[in-house]
């Protein structure tokens, strides 16, 4: 049987990649693959943050299926995933060796638990520090870091609500002269682990499923300085965590009283950081493919590259991801090499169908509980997510795309939105205010999908009980 490589990229928007037509050449390597890979121009995740997207894409079920009745519960997504069967588990039954290189703590054994479904796991999660050259002796600097962090955190918490401009100035200097912490390993560092493993004398490509997850395009965007200079020679990477923190306070925690500088300019800088991160990752993907070649990867290996979701940059008043179902967060990069016809494909596809498609390529029958089918344009695309709002209220969003339209329903606040994606691709004109009949039709469609999902869920639970 063929081996499978799955490369997932956190928070990557397709409309910021040159392979999808972006005005900056952020992905020259991915562009070079167009004569070998299928590139789906209109691909969707079925959830808008990491947990909801992976719970769906690795199990071919909708994100909130098998959720407890009380969604406001600790470890919600872990409990949901526990009820589902994942792609690596299925492949393990067919004697595949499943290997994970994971950099996202939310996917690890400590949170969602996705990596526990693999035979071999590299949890690449340690916090890393970019030490400034001006810190002097490394050992001495490290001894003082803990105390400095504590002092700065206490002082920063006091001052940022009173004078964010002063806080921003001081924090930027702190990052420049003391430390700049990342919450994840860079793609270059991840590739070192992959290279060491694949080029070891013990590795072979017989029946392998390898999953690699990169975090470089996740907030805060901290690309290497030389990539940032491609798009903005005046910016410094030390500003990125400060800008990210400002938007986090104002748009995620909901502290609207906080003031700093012109937000239009801050978003421009954020986009420069973001694009530079994408450009850096593209170079690292090129290096990864060289490692594949050096390791003797067979030509018939199936390779899938996709992002789990996008990111919002205040297009609809939201920042980062997980808080809406707009195009900027649910539309994803999705490309695949399977030995078949390459090029650009215009039909809508969804991550729900990914696992069944992979299984069909391998000649493996999909489990009954999986809802997806092979990658073809479905009748509709259903998506959902759940999160805690700034006021600690649990919010449930569900949406459906059918024909030209996208319908979004906020179940918590009973709010409707309806957009014509052909004539209004940026979702600026909410038709629910003007077209009540069409809104009602889509509300009924959404309800029928929910009923169908619940029936399937109950049927699967009943079959499990009978099997016992």
Image: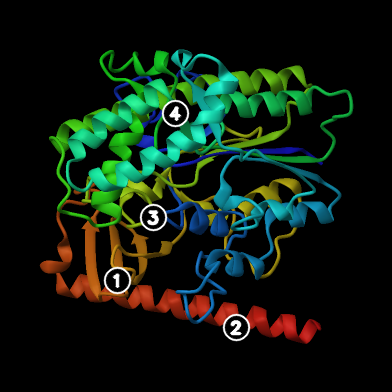
Mark closer to the observer (1, 2): 2
Secondary-structure class at tag 4:
strand
* Front position in the image: 259 or 432: 259
For disc 1, the neighbor class at 10 Å (few under 14, some 14 to 19, many from 20) is: many
Which quarter of the image is occupied by the C terminus?
A: bottom right
Residue placed under numbered mark 2 in the picture? 458
Which quarter of the image is occupied by the N terminus?
A: top right
Residue placed under numbered mark 4 in the picture? 180
Which of the 4 image quadrants contains residue 153?
Answer: top left
The x, y position of residue 372, in whole percent, is: 57, 61
Outermost right residue: 202
Image position of 280 with respect to 268: above or below:
above
Q: Name the disc covering residue 442, or none.
A: 1
Mark closer to the observer (3, 2): 3
Tell me which label, 3 or 2, sits earlier in the chain. Answer: 3
The residue shown at (78%, 28%) is 197
For disc 4, the neighbor class at 10 Å (few under 14, some 14 to 19, many from 20) is: some
Which of the 4 image quadrants contains residue 25?
Answer: top left
Tell me which label, 4 or 2, sits earlier in the chain. Answer: 4
Residue placed under numbered mark 3 in the picture? 322
Secondary-structure class at tag 2:
helix
Q: Can residue 34 be spotted in the picture? A: no
Q: Can residue 172 be spotted in the picture? A: yes
Secondary-structure class at tag 3:
loop
The x, y position of residue 383, in whole percent, is: 42, 62
For disc 3, the neighbor class at 10 Å (few under 14, some 14 to 19, many from 20) is: many
- In the displayed structure, does residue 298 sit left or right of residue 345? right
Cα distance in 3D space between marks 3 and 2: 27 Å
Tell me which label, 4 or 3, sits earlier in the chain. Answer: 4
């Amino acid at each position: 049987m063929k081996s499978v490589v799955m490369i997932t990229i956190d928070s990557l928007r397709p409309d910021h990649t040159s392979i999808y037509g972006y005005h900056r050449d952020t992905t020259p390597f991915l562009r070079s693959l167009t004569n070998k890979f299928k590139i789906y121009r209109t691909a969707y995740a079925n959830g808008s943050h990491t947990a909801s997207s992976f719970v769906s894409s690795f199990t071919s079920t909708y994100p909130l299926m098998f959720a407890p009745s009380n969604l406001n519960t600790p470890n919600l997504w872990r409990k949901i995933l526990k009820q589902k069967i994942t792609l690596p588990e299925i492949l393990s039954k067919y004697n595949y060796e499943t290997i994970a290189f994971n950099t996202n703590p939310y996917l690890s054994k400590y949170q969602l638990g996705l990596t526990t479904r693999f035979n071999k796991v590299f949890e690449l999660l340690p916090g890393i520090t970019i030490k400034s050259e001006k810190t002097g002796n490394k050992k001495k600097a490290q001894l003082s870091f803990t105390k400095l962090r504590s002092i700065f955190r206490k002082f920063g918490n006091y001052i940022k609500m009173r004078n964010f401009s002063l806080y921003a100035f001081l924090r930027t200097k702190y990052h420049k002269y003391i430390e700049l912490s990342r919450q994840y390993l860079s793609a270059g560092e991840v590739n070192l682990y992959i290279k060491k493993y694949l080029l070891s004398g013990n590795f072979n490509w017989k029946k392998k499923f390898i999953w690699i997850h990169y975090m470089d395009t996740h907030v805060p965007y901290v690309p290497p300085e030389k990539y940032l200079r491609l798009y903005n020679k005046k910016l410094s990477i030390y500003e990125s965590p400060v800008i990210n923190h400002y938007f986090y306070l104002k748009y995620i925690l909901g502290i609207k009283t906080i003031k700093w500088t012109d937000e239009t300019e801050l978003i421009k800088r954020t986009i420069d950081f973001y694009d530079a991160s994408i450009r850096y990752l593209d170079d690292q993907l090129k290096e990864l493919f060289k490692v594949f070649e050096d390791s003797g990867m067979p030509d018939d290996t199936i390779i899938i590259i996709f992002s789990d979701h996008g990111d919002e940059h205040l297009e609809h008043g939201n920042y980062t991801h997980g808080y809406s179902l707009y195009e900027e967060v649910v539309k994803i990069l999705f490309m695949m090499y399977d030995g078949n016809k390459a090029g650009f494909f215009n039909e809508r596809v969804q991550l729900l169908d990914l696992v069944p498609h992979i299984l069909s390529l391998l000649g493996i029958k999909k489990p009954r509980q999986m809802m997806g089918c092979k990658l073809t344009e479905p009748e509709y695309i259903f998506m959902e997510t759940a999160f805690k709002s700034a006021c600690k209220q649990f919010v449930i969003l569900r949406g459906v795309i059918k024909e030209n339209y996208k319908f979004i329903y906020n179940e918590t606040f009973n709010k409707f939105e309806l957009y014509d994606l052909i004539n209004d691709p940026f979702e600026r004109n909410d038709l629910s205010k003007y077209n009540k009949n069409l809104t009602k039709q889509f509300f009924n469609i959404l309800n029928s999908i929910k009923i169908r999902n619940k029936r399937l869920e109950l049927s699967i639970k009943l079959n499990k009980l009978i099997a016992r």
